[in-house]
Amino acid sequence: MQFSVGDKVVHPYHGPGRIIGVERREFLDGKKLYYQIEIPAQELTVYLPRAALDKVGVRPAMRQARLTHVLARLESHPDHLPEDFKERQDLVCEKLNTGRVMQVAEAVRDLSWHKERDHLTKRDTDLLTQGKTRLAAEMALVSDAEVSAMETRIDDTLAAALSGPGEREGYFQRP
């Protein structure tokens, strides 16, 4: 996949950013084209060879129209997470590391529900924070908003879902 300067992208491990430059670098095995990606949420700049973009999993950022789908996913009925903390954390890490916005939203939703039902370990809490940060950063990037405003929107959406009546209460019963 090819990108241009100014394109909004998501790196699966570092989160959303913007292509701020394309440059050729010369090495012993020849010249290679590199994308310079600024990741503001981490105050980081990543240099990736064009040939490695697909392998790494860099993708275009979601379209702004998809924000409503992301919020709906946060509000939707959660999937039960494993009681075993290692299994739970492996599952959540797998979703977060896909870099796919809906998978990240699911991980945030499921951990938030698990927190209401049971306790979160320190690692669970760190994963929840990481997921919220990545999600808020991508939402802010595509809507030209502040990350803090999107974090508030995520928290408000989750709070409304957690306090909602009806079928959600069934989540708190052990399977």
Image (cartoon, rainbow, N blue to C red):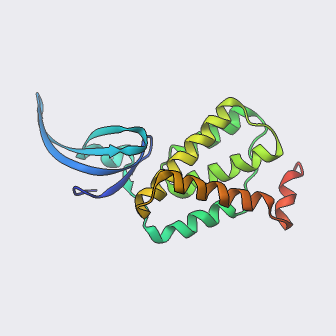
Q: Residue furthest right?
A: 173
Residue at 86% x, 52% y: name it. 172
In the drawing, does residue 111 fall left or right of residue 10? right
Q: Is residue 143 above or below residue 39?
A: below
Q: Nearer the viewer, residue 87 or 124?
A: 124
Q: Quadrant of the N terminus?
A: bottom left
Q: Position of residue 55 (x, y in %)?
A: 35, 45
Give me the residue at 15% from left, 40% from top: 32
**Residue 153, position as x, y percentages in the image:** 59, 59
**Observer-nearest residue: 132 or 98?**
132
Residue 150 located left or right of residue 170: left
Q: Quadrant of residue 165?
A: bottom right
Question: Is the residue 75 above or below the residue 32 in the image?
Answer: below
Q: Position of residue 127 (x, y in %)?
A: 61, 38
Question: Relative to 43, is 60 above or below?
Answer: below
Q: Is residue 135 left or right of residue 73?
A: left
Q: Quadrant of residue 86?
A: top right
Residue sticking out furthest to the top? 28
The answer to which quarter of the image holds residue 162 is bottom right
Q: Residue at x 60, y 41 (%)?
A: 129
Q: Residue at x 31, y 39 (%)?
A: 45
Q: Is residue 4 left or right of residue 100?
A: left
